[in-house]
Image: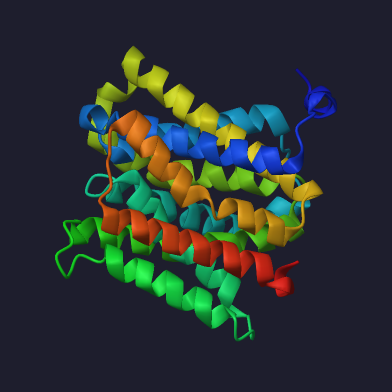
């Protein structure tokens, strides 16, 4: 089916597209985590990235252009950020629940949103987010694994780099060409670790089946977000994306049976409120 036909058939408002995209990516992650015991996080991540890249190549059909030759360094950096962000995040899931990992990782986009702000009210969002992160820190009686917490925070740092590189890539390439090329580059980077950690187990039918669905949900997420951003102000998009920790917590409970303690639930709520406030009232990014 042609993309133009898909676009003509879309009747959902952009806010719904964002909500569906968040549910899709967190569903993808929860399914991927359920397969870690079989092949490990790096193998599943490689399957997800490589198959999603193939899907987007088929959908968008990018062709060699002068922009690709002129900006190959940007594509490589974009792929590196994408690979590092997802690798740290997937490994964090080995140690901590999905909802906690997403909440900790969210310091990346939250930091980008607040970095250029000069509003006094934004100090409140910084304070709320800081309290949430402290509640999730592996100190003061927390049962969370410090390795998982550190990996999720590191993933947040790479997420911030990914956001900045996405903005640069979007100014250079049309449509989702940059994203498709970035996914392909990330897949090549992850290839040695993906194959090295699982070997021939990657081509088992049950693993390929899971990998296909994980990649499909990821490809749907990227495409829906791209479409939503064409029709939605950036600050409203940020408000909706701020619900991602809560969605991850819900799907972690439904699919993986991960139950968060009251302390962890409070931290998720505080970071979510901080992210919503930073996005809703930060007119600089509109």
Q: Residue at x 27, y 41 (%)?
A: 259
Residue 42 figure quarter: top left
Seen as rendered, the residue at the extreme top is 205
Tell me where residue 49 appears, x and y as whole percent.
47, 37
Tell me where residue 101 appears, x and y as whole percent.
35, 52
153 relative position to 14: left or right:
left
Q: Residue at x 30, y 32 (%)?
A: 256
Q: Residue at x 39, y 22 (%)?
A: 210
10 relative position to 126: left or right:
right
Residue 105 figure quarter: bottom left
Name the image quarter holding the C terminus.
bottom right
Q: Residue at x 51, y 71 (%)?
A: 111
Q: Is residue 154 above or below residue 45?
A: below
Seen as rendered, the residue at the extreme front is 262
Q: Nearer the viewer, residue 105 or 222?
A: 105
Name the image quarter holding the N terminus.
top right
Tell me where residue 118 appears, x and y as whole percent.
64, 86
271 relative position to 75: left or right:
left
172 relative position to 152: left or right:
right
Question: What count of labels does the image hold?
Answer: 0
Residue 263 figure quarter: bottom left
Look at the image and tell me whether residue 158 can be seen. no
Tell me where residue 53 appears, x and y as whole percent.
56, 35
Q: Is residue 12 above or below residue 79?
A: above
Q: Nearer the viewer, residue 136 or 124?
A: 124
Q: Is residue 163 above or below residue 41?
A: below
């Amino acid at each position: 089916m042609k993309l133009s036909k898909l676009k003509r058939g879309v009747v959902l408002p952009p806010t719904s597209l964002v909500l569906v995209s968040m549910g899709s990516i967190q569903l993808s992650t929860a399914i991927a985590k359920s397969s870690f015991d079989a092949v490990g996080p790096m193998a599943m991540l490689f399957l997800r990235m490589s198959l999603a890249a193939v899907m987007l190549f088929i959908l968008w059909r990018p062709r060699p252009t002068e922009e690709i030759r002129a900006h190959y360094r940007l594509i490589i950096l974009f792929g590196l950020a994408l690979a590092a962000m997802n690798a740290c995040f997937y490994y964090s899931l080995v140690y901590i629940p999905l909802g906690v990992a997403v909440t900790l990782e969210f310091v990346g986009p939250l930091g980008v949103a607040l970095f250029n702000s000069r509003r006094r009210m934004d100090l409140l969002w910084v304070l709320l987010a800081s309290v949430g992160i402290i509640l999730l820190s592996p100190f003061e009686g927390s049962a969370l694994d410090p390795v998982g917490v550190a990996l999720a925070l590191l993933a947040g740092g790479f997420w911030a780099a990914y956001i900045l590189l996405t903005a640069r890539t979007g100014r250079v390439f049309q449509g989702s060409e940059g994203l498709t090329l970035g996914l392909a580059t990330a897949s090549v980077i992850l290839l040695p670790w993906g194959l090295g950690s699982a070997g021939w187990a990657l081509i088992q039918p049950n693993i390929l089946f899971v990998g296909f669905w994980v990649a499909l949900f990821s490809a749907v997420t990227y495409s829906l977000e791209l479409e939503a951003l064409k029709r939605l102000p950036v600050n409203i998009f940020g408000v909706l994306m701020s619900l991602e920790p809560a969605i991850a917590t819900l799907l972690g409970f439904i699919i993986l049976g991960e139950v968060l303690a009251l302390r962890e639930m409070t931290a998720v709520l505080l970071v979510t409120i901080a992210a919503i406030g930073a996005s809703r009232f930060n007119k600089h990014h509109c």
